[in-house]
Amino acid sequence: MFLEKLVLIAGVCAAGAAAESLTPVWIELGPAKQVLARVVVRSGSDCPVLDADGKPLAMRLRLPVPPNFEPACEALVSEGTRKLRAGSRRLRLPNSPKTVVVLGDTGCRIKATNFQDCADPEKWPFGLVSSQVAMARPDLIVHVGDYLYREDVCPDPSPGCRGPHGDNWATWQADFFTPGAPALEAAPWAFSRGNHEECTRAWRGWFYYLDPRPFTGSCSVYSAPYVATSGDLNIGMLDSSAAGVRINALEVDQFASQLASFSGQASWIADHHPFWSYSGAGIGTTAPLVTAWNRASPAGVHFILSGHLHLFQFLSFNQTLPNQLIAGDGGTALSHSVKSDFTGTSVNGVVVRSGKSEHVFGFTVLRYARHRWNLALKTSHGATLVTCRILDDRPATCRNSE
């Protein structure tokens, strides 16, 4: 019996080694404390076999495969699994994180006559950001949405503009999976859906590759909320992809109901659109979310992670509102800049007790030590620009690094 079992394990491992993978195997968090392993492969017959605590864990084809997409394979990782390997590589599994990286808005913009040089890492630095994220050795990575920006045929013949476009595998590979590979290997992920993944844009790649739930082949305007769990950290995952700028009663009802579901269940929320931001005009960018928050006021939530604005911002208020991070600086063309310190200004009628903004490509690192989270804004080359001490019982304090 032992010999037969050994032969079986050797056989499935050999089959896994022969599989042709187009991405690294990555780990992502799903609802109800689920942990998923996923990979994109050349053929549906290439689904690899993982090693889970010395036992084979076969990855299964994720169906249905959308037209113009390469197939993905997935496996549900059992609770209590201690060691998981893909070939010779050990996969990081969720724990109570001491280091969390937040990034977003990472794709290379090509839309109409507005385009970046996707071949120049200084002009589209997501590959640099991904490598720096891996070097930070995070325990968890949160992407706050907007993965695919190559929406149109490039109007310019330059090499940095030519290439794939639209919602298909070639574009997802170019915009996310190839430059993001170092970070995909580094730690488990929690994925948020951005407005670039809404139902008129890149929804197929989002729901097939990154959404943690079964793929139906259709698009949902509002995905159901869920709580992603990594050890003792619970993050409410809110799909704000359809959020507008102006108040809409149906949107407010939808978001208020979803926010209420996080009450007492999550300490952080990750979504795409910021609830509060500084534009210089005294208003935030997503009025339906602010109105929904005021109605729901979910208990226990003290930090919101967002993107959408293509820059870094951090806003801390009094004890009645959570801290707001905007990490939309991951690679796509930056937004217009605003003043770097807006402490004391008013946003949606609320005074900002600590407010910082930076117009630079990068990502945010959160490290837990001495019963608090410490925030650092990192550039695409790893330099630290801003640091903040985040406290649950009083406003955060921030300063520029020297």
Image (cartoon, rainbow, N blue to C red):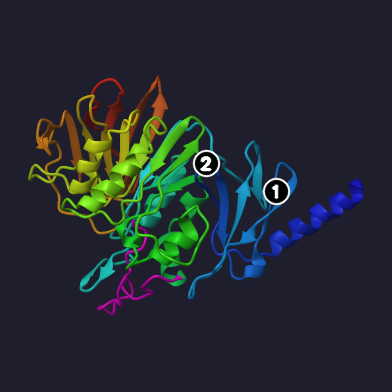
Question: Is residue 205 among what the camera can see?
Answer: yes
Image quadrant where one finds the C terminus: top left
Whether residue 166 appears in magenta in the rendering, the answer is: yes
In which quarter of the view is residue 350 placed? top left
Q: Main secondary structure of the magenta part?
A: loop
- The mark lying in front, picked from 2 and 1, is 2
What SS does tag 1 mark?
Answer: strand
**Height in image: 256 above or below 127?**
above
Question: Is residue 365 among what the camera can see?
Answer: no
Q: Which mark is residue 148?
A: none
What SS does tag 2 mark?
Answer: loop
Q: Residue at x 80, y 58 (%)?
A: 11
Q: Is residue 267 left or right of residue 94?
A: left
Of the two numbered discs 2 and 1 on the same chain, state the one appearing first in sequence: 2
Give, as a single range, the part of the protein colored magenta. Answer: 146-168
Spatial CA span between label 2 and label 1:
23 Å
Kindly give the residue lying farthest to the left in the view shown: 281
Mark 1 residue crowding within 10 angstroms, few (<14) / some (14–19) / many (20+): many
Q: Which residue is mark 1?
A: 51
> Where residue 185 sits in the image (x, y, percent)?
52, 50
Q: Is residue 9 left or right of residue 197?
A: right
Q: Which residue is mark 2?
A: 32
Disc 2 residue type? Answer: Ala
> Where residue 259 sits in the image (x, y, percent)?
33, 40
Whether residue 349 appears in magenta in the rendering, the answer is: no
Disc 1 residue type? Answer: Asp
Mark 2 residue crowding within 10 angstroms, few (<14) / some (14–19) / many (20+): few
